[in-house]
Amino acid sequence: MNFQTPETFDSFRCLAGDCPDTCCAGWEVVIDLESEQLYQRADGPMGQRLRDAMTLDADGDCIFINQDGRCPFLNPENLCDIHIALGEDALSETCRLYPRFYADYGSLREAGLSLSCPEAARLILSDPAPMRFVMAQNDEPSGYDPDLDPLFCARMLRARHLGRTLLQNRRFTIFERLALLLQFATRLTALLFMADEAAENALYTAFSDERQLTRTLSDLRSSVPPAEDEASGTLDALFNILIQCEHRQSAFTRQLERARKHLKSPDSLTAAGAFQSVHAHYYEHLSVYCLFRYFMDCAWSCEPLLQIQHIALACLSVYILSLSLWLEKDQALSEQEHQAVFCSYSREIEHSIPNQTLLSDHLTVDHALSAGVLSRLLVCFP
């Protein structure tokens, strides 16, 4: 089996008690069946403590009863009592693997690090060079998924590769690159169920040609309405949805509300030109991270455009949240402060299935968030 990871994958080391935002608080972690059985058999005071802490949630999943938003086994030093008493192998699957994630696409297995972890975010975001990936081979057998069409999967992997090339093309701003990727995904979606290999190849050729990319951006700019109503309507729609989402921490709600107020100030987006140079590569890395982690869901859903819309919204949202914080801090934002915005968005929005579903519903029906409107906004933003 082929095994692909970001280059930084093996560099991750948990900060444990030194982490600025422990992953053992603010989450409801489902305990897998094997771990549950282990905890039921555990003896001594720790075994009783484990059994007392377990309960079933509304979905019938086994979880620990959180105490004031913290795992009951997270001690005052922000260390795990289960790990201390029983060892790493006794941790539930989620706790043992996080922030690592894995996905299988036939003969290809991929793994990466979740942006919601502060140390993972540092590894993902800090290096200004384009994000690199490594491919290796191992002796594990290829997985078989009866719902996965190998030929369609190969087409989506090809699309993702072109998407990464576009997102890492620094001749254009990150927002121009996102607009181009939206245009590519729109045209690709129209070709998905047509047996027209020549047309699909022509699409890849067009979006690999610098002159054609420049013409596409020029065409998008010429289609922007003279009024700013469309742009402000899109940003208003986006932040209204984000505020409707479920939030684990009230601090994130307040962060969104402050950012929405800044959007209504004419000086805010004017100042965005100066903000663009603040850790500018972060947004490229965010978009590549999202593309790598989520785009291949369309191998089953057949909705590549929807995945790209989600990436564009994530970049816009984090950019505006970061811009808002930068303005509040008198136009000074440290790397750690900036990276914390990415972590917060990832925890609150990216890792919430209900929130992702809500966004998908609006992306499907809300004209203000359609691919065409988003493209026109991005190509002139900020």
Image (spheres, grey):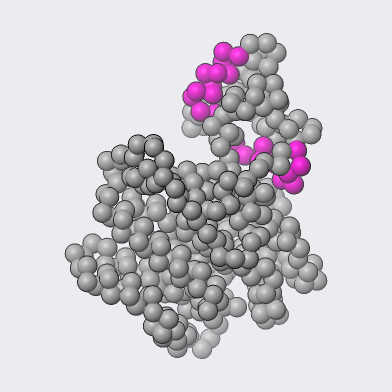
Towards the viewer: 126 or 277? 126
Q: Please state which of residues 314 and 149 is positioned toward the viewer in this rendering.
A: 149
Q: Looking at the image, which is closer to me, 248 or 337?
A: 337
- Image location (x, y in percent) of residue 370: 43, 69
Asked which quadrant contains residue 220, the reply is: bottom left
Residue visible at 75% across and 35% down?
Answer: 78
Left or right position of 321 against 333: left
Q: Position of residue 87 (x, y in %)?
A: 64, 24
- Residue drawn at x 50%, y 23% is 34
Q: Is residue 169 positioned above or below 48 on the image? A: below
Q: Which residues are magenta?
A: 17-42
Q: Position of residue 45 (x, y in %)?
A: 70, 13
Residue sitting farthest toward the left: 195
Q: Quadrant of residue 66?
A: top right
**At x 41% / y 40%, what residue is drawn?**
138
Residue in the image at 67% along x and 37% along y: 24
Q: Indicate the position of residue 55 as horizontal and vertical percent values.
A: 58, 24
Give the quarter of the figure containing the N terminus.
top left
Q: Is residue 366 visible?
A: no
Query: Is residue 21 part of the magenta span, yes or no?
Result: yes
